[in-house]
Image: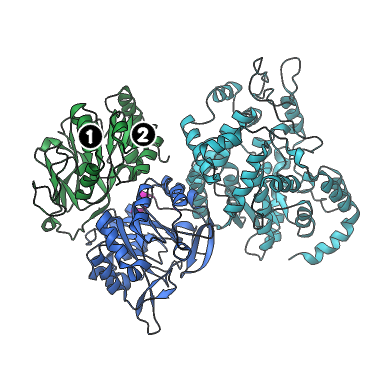
Chain colours: A blue, B green, C cyan
Amino acid sequence: MIRVRVIPVLLLGRGGMVKTKRFADPQYLGDPINAVRIFNEKQADELVILDIEATARGDVDFERIEDIVSEGFMPIAYGGGIRNTDQCAELFRRGVEKIVVNTALAESPQLVSDAAARFGSQSVVASIDVKPNLFRQPRAHTHGGRKATRYTPVELARTAVALGAGEIMLTAMTREGTFAGYDTALLAAVTEAVDVPVIANGGAGRIAHFVDAVVDGGCSAVAAGSLFVFAGKDAGVLITYPSEAELAEQFWSRIDGTVVH
Amino acid sequence: MIVIVDYGVGNLRSIQNMLARAGFEATIARDPQTIAQATKLILPGIGRFDYGMDSLRARGLVDVLNERVVGAQVPVLGICLGAQLLGRGSEEGGGGAGQGGRAKGLGWIPMDVVAFDRRRLVNGEKVPHMGWTDTTPAPNAVGGAGALFAGLDAPRFYYVHSYHFACDDAQDVLCSARHGYEFASGVRRGHIVGVQFHPEKSHRFGKQFLANFAALGTAAETATSAAAAAGAMAVGA
Amino acid sequence: MEPSSTSPASLALSAARSYGAALRVRTGVRDEPPLAKAPAAPPAAARTQPPRVCAKTVMDDSDPDIVFDADGVSNWWHDYQAAKAKRPDADRQAALLDATLTEVREHGRGKPYDCVLGVSGGVDSSYVAYLARQHGLRPLLVHFDNGWNDELAVHNIEKIVKTCGYRLHTFVMDWPEFRDLQRAYFKAGVLDLEVPTDHMIFGALHQVARRHGIGYVLTGTNFATEWLLPRAWHYSKRDLVNLQAIHRTHGETPMKRLPKIGVWQQLWYQRVQRIREVDILDLVPYRKTDAMRTLEREFGWTYYGGKHYESVFTRFYQGWILPMRFGIDKRRAHLSNLILNGELTRDEALAELAQPTYDPRQQMLDKQYVAKKLGWSAAEFDEILARPRTAHAAFGTDARQRKLAELAIRTLHPLARLVRGTARK
């Protein structure tokens, strides 16, 4: 039974943690340090922490990031405002395992290839946010989803891999925070086009959706935000993470035989 | 004194923090003087093989490491890239097995580091191998896998790598994991230990493993094993 | 529930009593201690004699107000017998419970929720949720996230939510503001570092109840395990004057989003909005050990160690700060309560007290964590913890406001009844 990774995604903003819905309406969730501590106690596989204000702010708050990631003894990927490889080195020194690039894929690809060359592909995650344009065609977006590029998700994914990214996190912007399920068509299009592991993100509402992401979407790992920070759809903030038994029974045992890892 | 070698690569703080949680103090050091006083060494590392070796050399650390490990027989634990450096060399960066790419390793264990054989990844497994994988201690590891895996029942660890160990001698294999095929995921020759996985990123399993290494050869070793057996592996902290 | 609680005579009577009592359904629960004098900061460290311990409970003279009789039995034992005698017997309890539940259900008819229930993941509030389910109430569960939740607490809340299917509303404290308030309390050197949390919970609970038009707040307060608490070991959670004074002196961030609740607001909630607190655990035979077993069985609930150790901050405060800095081991009060409740023997309590409050290694890790969360280096934290202690009252209290409020109730209550009728949602 393959243990497909299940990854909570935390967004930093508003002086703490926030959760958006379809990349809008950030809702304040509280202190990220304690959240990571709780995820650590729950033995979460991995975490992705994205500072959604960093790119606009133009810096990386190393002290704060270290305070947060030092509570987690699992791999933690950080993204937001990274502009050069020295910042990456500093992040790794402080406990980050992988760096996440988003806007850089389209606007400063040199950063991606430099980071991959210096630290190895497995340390670089390309985060691609996707939303359909006016003609219902999927387009990659940057700057926290605010700026549309002309790239399709497949094009940008291929570019990311060519630049040296070792993993892709693919987020369906219109599904984010809806609990309605992943966009498996989008996932499948990208997983078929690239060789590196693809992490599904955006829309997970229950463990059954994880199965869909792997079986229908071809993903190697699954990520979720709202599912792990709210007690349920339209419910209050509560950090949760499925137990191993739940994951084994409802997820991993149901994807046996599917090409994945 | 446990010294975590800072040669510009790797997750030093995480290792230090995890050891602290397990009750062991460790120092992060980059200068030969401090390293020369180590009673145990940890060699971390992520990234490219040749970059790692170049960094060690550029910082003038190869001599003191040789003195400590080969000369004074100080126990050393290599983690991920740090473990790969313990061998003769790596295919990474070009060059075949045994030719050690562009840079040779420390040569403390007769092994090479080779790329995953993609022909044997029959179920479409991807490279790098990334994720939590069950790890089995080898029954006939020289020096025993027992002490290092004390208190670890069916452990899994976090792996992220594209290359793995290829030992000359099966007895140097400490533990193995499976990614498409079974490969050596840990090596041990006496006081020299190397693991491909990241204990500092492996929750309670990693904490127990690091604690076991830190307790090696001390009175604490028996205590650690006993405590582990008594179920000290509680979730959290 | 007292049937005469809305009669003029009863209202006047309750107004003349301690303010705290006026806000609660009269079930014989011990009132908020009247703040006639400031609790003295107990002297630290070096004792010349060993502490004197009560012969029946385990309270000792770290309670500066303790009095021992000729047999070495403390006032706590005697006071408890007296207080217990005044409490309703089992039949009366059952009748009160029945009447209360009926009123709550009646009042909530046609509305999405009939009561608000604050859940912390701890025994008391979790057991209240169990009772709510047993008796078919429809609570809105409210959780206060002050940024210090322990994982087990969160786990327990999850179990309750998933098992009962209740709706959970989380009131997330603004962390930068809350942190600043906590820092202010540390800098002030005052005793009760839980006041920020407890005060804001109190305020938030009422805010949520009001917003949803709910008239009843089920609390986890209980005589059985909480009656015994020396005045000198805590400070009023409701005193906003004190809180604001401490913050004004030592805080840096204005408190804009924190749900403060002052005397007048409390009055408004109680008299005009008619939000009533129900100490439901006083209406059932409550035994902590039985409660925990029930919760484990019914919800898959897990014990987190110690009373209130569902919060990392509380664990460190009660387990390290109170003993080390103030010479107070709050376990003495908790364990004495259990002795009085017949759940523990004195020997068992003494054995427990001989142990550290909790794992010393965890205490050091918690200390690092608390310092980190509050934004202090280890050295800075040590310096702050070494500052001289200051009595709460030195910053001023809400005594004057409360007197005014009592006066207002007495003179204006007929008017209030009129307003109440129209303000009710």
- Label 2 marks which chain's residue? B
| Residue B135 shows in the view | no
Q: Which residue has dot 1 on it?
A: B65
Three-letter code, disc 2: Ala
Q: Residue at x 84, y 43 (%)?
A: C17
Horizontal and vertical percent position of residue B233: 37, 36
Local crowd size for mark 1, using a 10 Å CA cut-off: few (<14), some (14–19), many (≥20) = many
| Residue A145 shows in the view | yes
Mark 1 or 2, closer to the camera: 1
User: Image height check: is A113 above or below C79?
Assistant: below
Horizontal and vertical percent position of residue A65: 44, 52
Horizontal and vertical percent position of residue B58: 24, 44
Q: Is residue C110 magenta?
A: no
**Picture quadrant where residue B176 is located:** top left
Q: Quadrant of the C terminus of chain B?
A: top left
| Towards the viewer: C124 or A183 | A183
A239 left or right of C396 in image? left
Q: Earlier in the sequence, mark 1 or mark 2?
A: 2
